[in-house]
Image: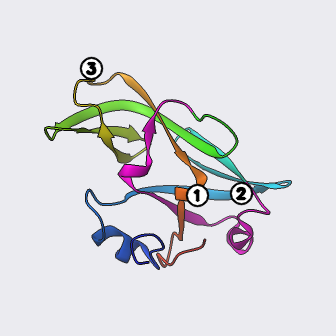
């Protein structure tokens, strides 16, 4: 329960390895969607699916995503969101590798990558996550919003 639904960024940061990725975002309302954006990256979420965000419009939020829930590539449909950025480094772990991608000011780790995959440092890498694996936290208190 603590791993799947952490109550705060503090809890999310020490449960799991590698630790959860955190991306600072600004929240805005756009019709029946919420728009989360930072540093040239933006995505939308259906307001009815994330109704707990409504009181936080105009505030900062933190998106938390476990490295194991990210995959390489663009979003495959409406149920996924995507990011992209330059590859900063890789960590070879034998049967897998971890890619570190710069998204805005954040270094985002992608776990479970095929160890045979070769990507040049600074190459643009697209990553995606199913929204069921997206954790949203209050940017001031760190408390969970979803």
Mark 2 or mark 3: whose residue is earlier in sequence: 2
Look at the image and say whether residue 63 sits in the magenta stretch.
yes
Instruction: Where is residue 143? Give x, y as percent.
Output: 50, 78
Q: Does residue 23 lie above or below 139 as drawn?
A: above
Q: Please report the residue visible at 53 percent of the width from the left and 75 percent of the height from the top.
A: 144
Q: Quadrant of the C terminus?
A: bottom right
Q: Which mark is residue 120?
A: 3
Helix, strand or loop under label 2: strand
The N terminus is located in which quarter? bottom left
Q: Residue at x 77, y 60 (%)?
A: 47
Do callouts 1 and 3 mark residues in contact (Cβ within 8 Å)? no
Query: From the viewer's perspective, is the residue at label 2 or at label 3 nearer?
Result: 3
Left/right of residue 120 with respect to residue 124 in the rendered view = left
Compare residues 64 and 73 and report the one nearer the observer: 73
Disc on the earlier residue, 1 or 3: 3
Quarter location, residue 28: bottom right
Single out the residue that lies furthest toward the right: 31
Task: Say which residue label 1 marks.
Answer: 132
Residue farthest toward the front in the current orientation of the protein: 95
Q: Quadrant of residue 88?
A: top left
Q: Which residues are magenta?
A: 46-74
Q: Return the x and y of residue 122 as percentages of the image width and height.
A: 31, 24
Q: Residues within 10 Å of mark 3 (few under 14, many from 20)?
A: few
- Mark carried by residue 28: 2
Disc 1 versus disc 2: distance between alpha carbons? 20 Å
Q: Which one is in front in this view, the residue at disc 1 or the one at disc 3? A: 1
Is 60 above or below relative to 102? below
Contact (CB < 8 A) between labels 2 and 3? no
- Secondary structure at badge 1 equals helix
Q: How was this image coloured?
A: rainbow
């Amino acid at each position: 329960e603590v791993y799947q639904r952490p109550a705060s960024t503090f809890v999310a940061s020490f449960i799991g390895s590698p630790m959860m990725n955190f991306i600072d975002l600004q929240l805005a309302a756009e019709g029946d969607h919420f728009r989360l954006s930072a540093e040239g990256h933006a995505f939308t979420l259906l307001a009815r699916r994330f109704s707990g965000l409504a009181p936080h419009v105009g505030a900062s939020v933190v998106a938390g995503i476990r490295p194991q829930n990210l995959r390489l590539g663009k979003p495959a449909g409406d149920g996924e969101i995507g990011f992209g950025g330059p590859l900063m480094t890789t960590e070879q772990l034998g049967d897998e590798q971890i890619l570190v991608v710069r998204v805005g000011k954040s270094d985002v780790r992608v776990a479970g990558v095929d160890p045979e995959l070769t990507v040049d440092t600074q190459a643009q890498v697209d990553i995606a996550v199913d929204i069921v694996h997206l954790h949203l936290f209050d940017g001031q208190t760190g408390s969970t919003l979803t």
